[in-house]
Image (cartoon, rainbow, N blue to C red):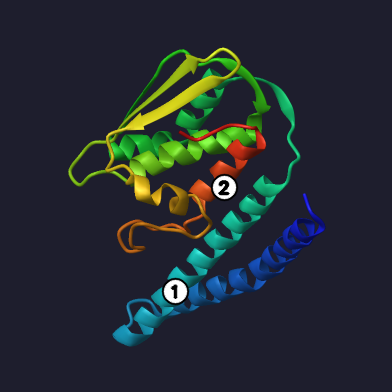
Amino acid sequence: MSQNSDDLDEFISIATHDLKAPLSHISSFANLRKRELGQSENEDIEKWINNILSGTKRMQALLEDLSSYSFARRGQLFLEPTDLNTVFENVIFDLSLNIKESKTTVTKSDLPTVTVDKIKIYRVFQNIIENAIKFNRTHTTPQISITGEDLGEFWKISFIDNGPGIAPEFFEQIFKPFQRLQGLKDYPGTGMGLAIWKKIIDLHGGLLF
């Protein structure tokens, strides 16, 4: 990576670290005031406090994702033979409540053991499955299928779901930081998830298709 990239990552690391404390204090103070007011008859005050809490929560999530993106940008990989079936099982266990509440069905074929950074690939699996659950058609139960295909020198890992999909003209845009195709009210999030896991795939020399 270039010196400019290193400087940017260092800036992101310092900024995200230094901003977490004041945001936490703002959130704690707002929660304290909300508890003190109880069932206040002043709807404006309650609305202001809820807006503060909503804003700080979104900022905290954004800082976490910025930190994750900066981490993913760095070329440091801890490569080791990794059973993707185990990665899948760990992700499903960690997302079990989300899967149960959304009544999502997740199936897979037998997946290979490949040499990857286990922690980063876990993040990819987690993000893709979370997105498939979140971005689904109205009144449709999410269905996700994961398969592995041996292409010789490489393995093709496919994630297929019954969501609305992404139109081809948005393929390049959607993998850039902070890019969203849906409104924040409909689908909460920071718009960093796809950028993070694309960067992880790039670091491993993988392709998206």
Image height of 112 relative to 14, above or below: above
Q: What is the spatial separation of the Cα atoms under label 1 and label 2, in whole angstroms?
A: 37 Å
Q: Residues within 10 Å of mark 1 (few under 14, many from 20)?
A: few
> Residue 157 at what x, y percent from top left?
48, 24
Q: Nearer the viewer, residue 157 or 20?
A: 157
- Residue farthest front in this picture: 169
Q: Residues within 10 Å of mark 2 (few under 14, many from 20)?
A: many
Residue 129's tag is: none
* In-image side of 21 versus 36 (left or right): right
Which residue is labeled 1 in the image? 35
Asked where in the image residue 21 lies, by quadrant, the reply is bottom right
Which quadrant, please, contains the C terminus?
A: top left
Q: Nearer the viewer, residue 37 or 106?
A: 106
Which residue is labeled 2 in the image? 196
Image height of 151 relative to 19, above or below: above
Asked where in the image residue 3 lies, by quadrant, the reply is bottom right
Picture residue at 57% right of the left edge, 33% below the top:
122
Picture residue at 55% right of the left edge, 76% below the top:
29
> Residue 20 at what x, y percent from top left?
65, 66
The mark nearer the N terminus, 1 or 2, is 1
Callout 2 amino acid? Ile
Picture residue at 32% right of the left edge, 33% below the top:
161
Callout 1 amino acid? Arg
Mark 2 residue element: helix
